[in-house]
Amino acid sequence: MKLRALSLCVFACTACAFDIDDFFDQVDNALTASAFHDNLRVRLSGTLDLEIYHFEQPAPGLIDSSIDTLFNPRLILFLDAQVGSHIYFFSQSRLDRGFDPSDHGAQVRLDEYALRVTPWDDGRFTLQIGKFATVVGNWVPRHLPWENPFINAPIVYENVTPIRDKSAPFSVFDFVYGFYYYQKYAFNPVIWGPSYASGISVSGRLDRFDYAVEMKNASLSSRPESWSVTETGFEYPTFSGRVGFRPNEAWNFGLSASEGPYFRREAEATLPPGRDIGDYREFVIGQDASFAWRHLQVWVEFYEARFQVPRVGNADTLAYYVEAKYKFTPQLFAAIRWNQQLFDDVSDPSGGSIRWSEDLARIDLAAGYRFTSHTQLKLQYSYQHETTGQGNDNHLVAAQLTTRF
Amino acid sequence: MRLRRLLWFNAVFSIMPVVLLAGVVVEGRVELPKSHSAPVQAKRYEIVTKGGVLSTQPPLAVVYLDGAFPRPASVPTKEVAQKDLTFVPALLPIRIGTRVEFPNLDDTYHNIFSYSPAKRFDLGRYRAEERPIPAEVFDKPGLVTLRCDIHDHMRGLILVLNTSYFVMTDTDGHFRLSGLPPGRYTLKAWIDSRTTREKPVELKDGQTLHVDFP
């Protein structure tokens, strides 16, 4: 009976899909405006996401919730404006329960805003200033709900490590076993999601090569509260860059690097005497590749990261994932992603060494169906397993319904 | 005398098919809607972007003679290209059964798809130099909206018609439809997905009819 009802629902949705698409196209026309002989063009668009997560405690990734089943609605509004042929502005604002899924109350944020100047038509040079996603890696272009084949991010963008940016550890054991004493939100991943920090970037293309360099106010691992210029200034900037090589449309290879201090200002009091925030840095080297042809897309990213940790030394980690998406029909797609993060040892006071976090492996499976070109349903299952230590597991089931306009 | 008659008969006979082929002509004007606002390309997460702006597509209408006409023996292949991140042409009327090719003339990928009931397809991503050029045969009448999975702003329309007698207006709305067969028909003007105007017409051989769609 339930199956019949579901089939009927899918049929009804598909049958009226054309009318819905037509309606959203009319909305799109209504939300697009131009003036001064089309020299000023503005478009308002967005997505409405309804997400449900079910997981075991502790919640996986950057999910910040003490309840096992979390409902996470989100409204995203984009503003894109083109002034003449060389100036472009965009912004992204959100109404949700937090930048990452959480059981907190509603909040409104301006997550991104940037002004971009492209003086030459061939794209050899672009200057951008504002608060915007990092140029590192190849995940950012598909991190939003409509483009992302999954509901969550690859492990390197969301797995919290023992790194803390608000206070320095007072010993190696405090660093390694801090998870047991502090709230989860005290810790940082290697790269915090798309890392919408504030700053300036320069990018361009020279034949088959492209480049991008940015100076931001916060490191790749920094939390969303650090990304705003009102919160974090440019006294301790982070420099990141990526060089890409595209032999043809199907293949894309990239090398990324990033370097900058990762502590927030309130951590200063906890640093060893005579040291300041600038003495403890995050170094990231990344390699990425992607392939796309017909209905298949594949992405790979490898990251090696080093954190300089007070009273501990260098804490190294390696994280990678391989992700593939395939469209079986015009409306149905499936995706699979294998993620792994490995942690090196740090020296303990007794002269031995200790792994600074447990190695992790995670497989993500997702299926998506586009009822219309504006409505999409995704289902995801993830299984995470600690490959060292106690071998803890975690299962995540999630659903996300996205309507874009 | 017999020779003169034969020559005269020959001349009349040779001209006749031309007259028949010329058929009836309908011309007139369609009141077109106001232009949509110029499109805006979302370039938020493109590390490298080119300068320039997207071209504005003026609204056009398709005028066609509705009725039951025999299918032609062959239908020519048509083309909708992806050039400068737009569909060219943005509106293509075709006879049912027409094969349409979708060449990619840009140096970046496109992913053309349609969820329209008249034709549901997804061509995936393909390079400009790939042969054969991906194509689809449109075998159901109706409006097909073309989109690109990569470039959100891209929209194209294919109007699949049950008739071979159709023409697109110019940007002022003027049209001229020639070679029509005599008889009683309905002349329709497709203006957009929600607006199709129609008028009954009686076409007489050799006539030039003026029809406006205000």
Image: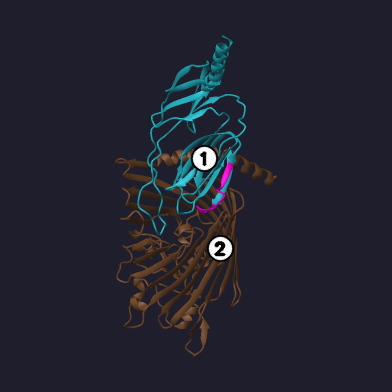
Chain colours: A brown, B cyan
Q: The residue marked by circle 2 belongs to what chain? A: A
At label 1, counting other C-alpha atoms closer than 10 Å, the crowd grade (few under 14, some 14-19, many 20 or more) is: many
Q: Is residue A379 above or below residue B7?
A: below
Q: Nearer the viewer, residue A244 or A92?
A: A244
Q: Where residue A296 sits: x, y (%)?
A: 57, 57
Q: Is residue B72 left or right of residue A180?
A: right
Q: Is residue A223 magenta?
A: no
The answer to which quarter of the image holds residue A108 is: bottom left
Task: Return the mark for residue B145.
Answer: 1
For label 2, the residue is A323
Q: Characterize the magenta stretch by its predominant secondary structure.
A: loop
> Tag 1: residue type?
Thr
Q: Residue at x 38, y 76 (%)?
A: A281
> Tag 2: residue type?
Glu
Q: Dot 2 lies on which element?
A: strand
The magenta region covers: B125-136
Q: Where residue A271 sits: x, y (%)?
A: 36, 79
